Image (cartoon, helix red, strand yellow):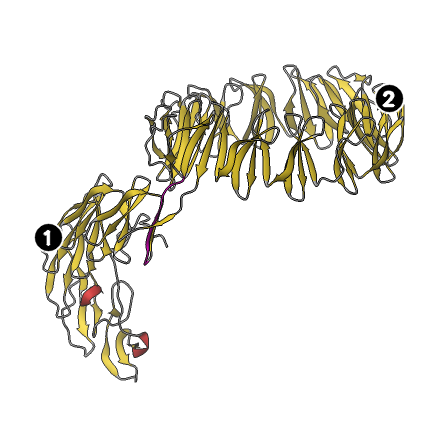
Amino acid sequence: MRYFLRGLVLILITAVSVAQSKDFQLIYKNGKVGLSDANGNVIIPAEYEKLGWSTGNEEPQSNTIGYKKGELWGLLTLNNQRITEAEYTSLYPAKGGFYIASVRGKVSHNDFLGVITNQGKIIIPFKYNAIKVVDLRAVVGIKYGRQYKFGVVDMTDKSIIPVEYKEIISLGQLRFAVKNFENKTAIFSDAGKPMVDFVLDSISNYRNGHAIIYANHQLGVVDNNGQIIEEPQYQDVLLDDDLQVKGFDEWQVLKAGKASSSMYYDHIRPFGEQNYKVGANGKSWVISKDNEPLTPQRFTYIDEPVNGKMLFRYHNKWGIINSDGEIFMKPKYDSLILNKDVIYAKSKGNWSLFDFHGVQKSNTNYEEIGKRTGYYYPVKKKNHWGFIDRSGEEIIHCVYDQVGEIINNMVVVRFHGEYGILDKMGEWVVLPQRGRLTIINDDYYLIKSGKLSTLKSYDDETIYFTENKVDIMEDHLLEHLSDGGLWKIDFNGRIVNRDIPQQRFEEIRSSGAGLFAVKYQGRFGFVDNQNRLIIANRYENVGDFGDGLIAVKLLGKWGYIDRYEKIIIQPVYTEVSIFKNNMAIVKAPSGYGIIDKEGKKLTPQNFDEITVLPSGRFLVKKQGKYGLLDTEGSFLINAKYDMLEEVNDMYVKVSLFNKYGVLSNNGVDVIPIMYDDLFYDARFDEYLVMKKSSWVKVAQ
């Protein structure tokens, strides 16, 4: 089991109960509270405002209980004998039979904490802002402005570790993890002796006499004498009875049969034009091709570069580094977006715009900044939208309910629930009205009000209107008629139909070769762009033309015809593809296969799957195993691999029994199938290969 020190926070208020709630019960009388034992005998009369502790716990501790009179707390025995007067602003038990109490400062009026015994003796004076008792030591803190500094004292207030550190945590085994203000951690004994210097990021609790130490992204082991028995260089550590360590996975670069020196990371991938991004134990950084770190090794995420800059995340905040690893914007933002030549930055709920020199361009913090449209950015302020330019100037003020994309230096906006069109200076081109508006070009726009669509010019001239559905095309409108036909309307309002079939078809598809597949009375046929019937409507379904043939479905089976409706391949298949390079993939009852344009079987029809690869070759699957066919359908690599994918025109990556390797196109081993991961880096025509590490027992 792994033990991590995950941002442990010093909890300074601790209540420890040793008595069972069933042994005692609070009693109430006349607005006062007392205590009875398990037999109902009153052991403390009901004469106090509260019994218990200022933390809210009501259980007695070591035959004592706190009481409250007025606004202050004191300590009682369970025989109602007052150990202290009610003089503390807070009081609660700590470990070892001690009590943490506080008094109000006379000058600052702040509470100061100290420690008393069960006889009421003050053993640690009231001068601290935080205390946690640990065995016979107390971690104490003093507040300086907004910052705390911590140290350790014994139970006589003798200094063990000076009060000058950012954080101190008990590790058990009489050891303390001490963090300085450079966020480095050391280990101190309970005598205040440094056992490990300030070189660690953190340390786990001790278990079986050992603790895990963390430095950068690596783990090591320290014993309870402070002796580092394994330097921080491992991926994982097990603090079981048998102490074990596990190294990072081993990566190498293979090229021309030669291997580079080993690199040890959780993962490594190409990054940018020359480098690699690597990761280990939740950290990411960039290294050079020579394995030299280019960025700090403490980020939790690094994004791909954009114009020489990279986003990174650190402590849940985002920043930007340059390609050389230099911090460009500090990690202080809730969100950052790199967008070619500008940077969107979100902090404290508001967005700002920066240029690629890191200069803030927008003077106002916006609730939202949208993607650039035209040369401008939509921005939202006080729940209203406007636009800024690249210099951050608000060229269209944030007074609109909604804004669209800028088209031809104009934009549709919604203003008080109505729609209008503005120019890029914020002047009205079309005044607000109820209908929804769409900019078509420099001369025309479309207004849709209810079912009515109206084509208008910016001079307010009505060009065309209809209640039919209208699609806006590049140089015309496409009107869908109620009888299923289509009209092409030019921007002068004229109906032109030369390229659109005009019959009452249920469906129209462009199928290539100048033909349209049309569905009429539930059956498919083909017409040309003059609406002339080329192939009668007799097919249940049809495909697209390819290599002069088109797939048709008849009586539930697929075959192929030419454009003259001659049956070239009989309809005997359950699935077919379009013909390409004079070949098609078909499915028979026995499985998938490949045929040529004469219907000749180029492969057996017994594959589970066939996929055309970018190279034109075919990936085949049979009985759960993969193989490769050439562009003519002949076997290159038999179907015997768990995975197969093309690397390039010459090689393929394969896996078998969870191991990876590379084969040539004729199945010859190029890289043996022996690696736990393998990645082709096309930038340098080389391979990244990995072997997993294993657990090793540490001699003690």
Residue 460 visible in the displayed image: yes
Asked if residue 248 lies in the magenta stretch, the reply is yes
Q: Quadrant of residue 38?
A: bottom left
Q: Nearer the viewer, residue 517 or 304?
A: 304
Q: Mark 1 points at which residue?
A: 159
Q: Residue at x 51, y 17 (%)?
A: 425
Q: Which amino acid does label 2 sit on?
A: Asn
- Pointer 2: what residue? 531
Segment tinted magenta in the rendering:
241-249
Dot 1: what SS? strand
Residue 299, image quadrant: top left
Horizontal side, residue 477 vs residue 296: left or right:
right
CB atoms of marks 1 and 2 within 8 Å: no
Sequence order check: which comes first, mark 1 or mark 2? 1
Tell me which amino acid carries mark 1: Ser
| Screen quadrant of the C terminus | bottom left
Give how far across and how far down residue 166 sits, in percent.
21, 45
* Nearer to me, 531 or 205: 205
Q: Is residue 516 above or below residue 127?
A: above
Q: Is residue 59 above or below residue 590?
A: below
Residue 134 lies, in percent from the top left, at 20, 59
